[in-house]
Image: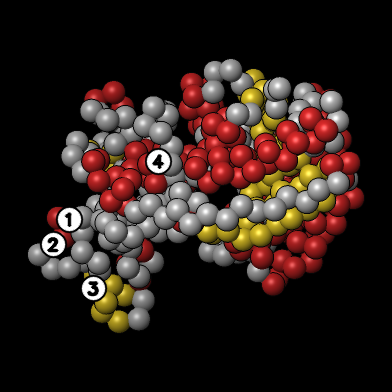
C-alpha cells in the first residue's frame, strides 16, 4: 500500500529523507531557493520539484497525497532574531501552508518550526495557527522536542505540529525516545582529510577526498566569542546553524576560557586546534548519510542547507509513528 506525501518548504530534504526511510513516497516538492535545487534533484531524482514561490502556486497545481510535510521559514520566529512572527512576510507564509492544507485535505500533516514560536509575544499568533489547523479539519497535537533524545547527536529544540484529519478520529501521540548518540559516535572517523575552504569561502569541490568535508574560514565575531562554542567528544553538539560563520568548533579543541561576562578566548597555545566543523561533519550531526551529497559553489550555502534541515533520524522516528496510524486507518476503511 503506497503512502504518498508532498513536501513544502523542502530545503535540502532532511525531513523528506526521514519520511522516505520510513516508507513514504515523496511525489512532489516545492523549493524556491535556487541554491538548493541541484542538491535536492540529485538526491531525490524520483520527486517532481516545483521551483516557484509558494504564494504563486495554486492548490490545483499540487497533486493529492496522504500527507503534507514541511517547515515554513523560521527566521520570523527565531529567538535570536527580531521575532516579528506574522509581522514579517516570512512568517505569513505559514498561512500559505494552511491554505494548501485546507484545499488538499490529506490524512495528515507535519509542520516544524523553531522554539521561538512558543515565546509569549507570539501567543496570539500561535493560537491563530492552531485554530486555523482545526478549522481546516484537523485534530492537532504540538510540542517542543529536543532532537538529542531522538537518535540525533545534537541539542536542537524544535516545535512540531502534527495533525490528523478529523475523519480519522485520532490524535497523534508523540513517541518517546532516549537514544542520545555523541560526537564521538558520529564524527570521530572524520578527523582526517578535512580541508579549509578556498579563498572567499569558495568550495574545493571535486578536489576533496570526502565530499563536503571542508570548513568555513575567517575571523570569529565578538558575538561568537561571547560564549563557549566547544562541545567535547562525549557530548552532543550545539545546534547546527544555517551559517558557516556560526558553526560550532570541532571537539578536538579544549573548551574556551572564560575572561569576563560575554567574553571568552581560545586556550593559549592550543589555538591551532580551533576550527569550525566542516559541512560534512555538520551533515553527520544532522544525521544525513554520507552518500547524500550537497552541491554548492559558496561553502556557506552548504552550511545553510544542512543547518536549515530537519535531522533525518528525528524525522524518521516521527514518520514511523505516523505511518502506523494512517496504515491502521486505511486498513480499517479498505
**Residue labelled with disc 4:** 283
> Do tag 2 and tag 1 residues touch (Cβ < 8 Å)?
yes
- Residue at coordinates 70% horizontally, 26% vertically from top-left? 4
Q: Locate the N terminus by quadrant.
A: top right
Q: Locate the C terminus by quadrant.
A: top right
- Residue 92, x across and y down, in percent: 74, 50
Relative side of 56 to 135, left or right: left
Give the mark, 1 or 4, whose residue is nearer the N terminus.
1
Local SS, label 1: helix
**Residue labelled with disc 2:** 270
- Residue at coordinates 58% horizontally, 33% vertically from top-left? 22
- Residue 297, x across and y down, in percent: 38, 30
Q: Label 1 vs label 4: CA separation?
A: 21 Å
Q: Label 2 vs label 1: CA separation?
A: 6 Å
| Residue 234 seen in the figure | yes
Local SS, label 4: helix
Q: Is residue 84 above or below residue 188?
A: below
Coloring scheme of the render? secondary structure
Figure quadrant of residue 298: top left
Local SS, label 2: loop
**Residue labelled with disc 3:** 257
| Residue 240 seen in the figure | no
Give the mark, 3 or 1, whose residue is nearer the N terminus.
3
- Residue 212, x across and y down, in percent: 33, 34
**Residue labelled with disc 1:** 273
- Residue at coordinates 55% horizontally, 36% vertically from top-left? 18
Amino acid at each position: 500500500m503506497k503512502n504518498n506525501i508532498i513536501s513544502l518548504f523542502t530545503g535540502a530534504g532532511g525531513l523528506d529523507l526521514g519520511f522516505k526511510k520510513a516508507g513514504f513516497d515523496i511525489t512532489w516538492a516545492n523549493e524556491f531557493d535556487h541554491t538548493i535545487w541541484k542538491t535536492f534533484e540529485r538526491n531525490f531524482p524520483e520527486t517532481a520539484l516545483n521551483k516557484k514561490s509558494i504564494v504563486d502556486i495554486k492548490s490545483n497545481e499540487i497533486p493529492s497525497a496522504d500527507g503534507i510535510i514541511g517547515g515554513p521559514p523560521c527566521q520570523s520566529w527565531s529567538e535570536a532574531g527580531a521575532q516579528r512572527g506574522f509581522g514579517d512576510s516570512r512568517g505569513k507564509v505559514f498561512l500559505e501552508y494552511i491554505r494548501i492544507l485546507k484545499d488538499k485535505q490529506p490524512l495528515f500533516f507535519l509542520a516544524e518550526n523553531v522554539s521561538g514560536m512558543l515565546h509569549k509575544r507570539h501567543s496570539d499568533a500561535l493560537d491563530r495557527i492552531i485554530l486555523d489547523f482545526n478549522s481546516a479539519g484537523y485534530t492537532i497535537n504540538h510540542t517542543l522536542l529536543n532532537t538529542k533524545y531522538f537518535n540525533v547527536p545534537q541539542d536542537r529544540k524544535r516545535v512540531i505540529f502534527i495533525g490528523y484529519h478529523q475523519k480519522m478520529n485520532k490524535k497523534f501521540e508523540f513517541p518517546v525516545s532516549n537514544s542520545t548518540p555523541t560526537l564521538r559516535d558520529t564524527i570521530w572517523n572524520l578527523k582526517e582529510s578535512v580541508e579549509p575552504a578556498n579563498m572567499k569561502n569558495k568550495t574545493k569541490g571535486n578536489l576533496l577526498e570526502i565530499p563536503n568535508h571542508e570548513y568555513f574560514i575567517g575571523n570569529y565575531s565578538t558575538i561568537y566569542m561571547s560564549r563557549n562554542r566547544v562541545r567535547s567528544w562525549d557530548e552532543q553538539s550545539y545546534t547546527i546553524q544555517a551559517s558557516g560563520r556560526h558553526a560550532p568548533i570541532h571537539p578536538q579543541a579544549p573548551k574556551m576560557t572564560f575572561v569576563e561576562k560575554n567574553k571568552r578566548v581560545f586556550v593559549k597555545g592550543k589555538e591551532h586546534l580551533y576550527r569550525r566543523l566542516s559541512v560534512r561533519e555538520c551533515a553527520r550531526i544532522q544525521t544525513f548519510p554520507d552518500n547524500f551529497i550537497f552541491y554548492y559553489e559558496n561553502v556557506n550555502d552548504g552550511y545553510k542547507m544542512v543547518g536549515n534541515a530537519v535531522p533525518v533520524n528525528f524525522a524518521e522516528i516521527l514518520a514511523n509513528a505516523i505511518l502506523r496510524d494512517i496504515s491502521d486507518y486505511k486498513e480499517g476503511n479498505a
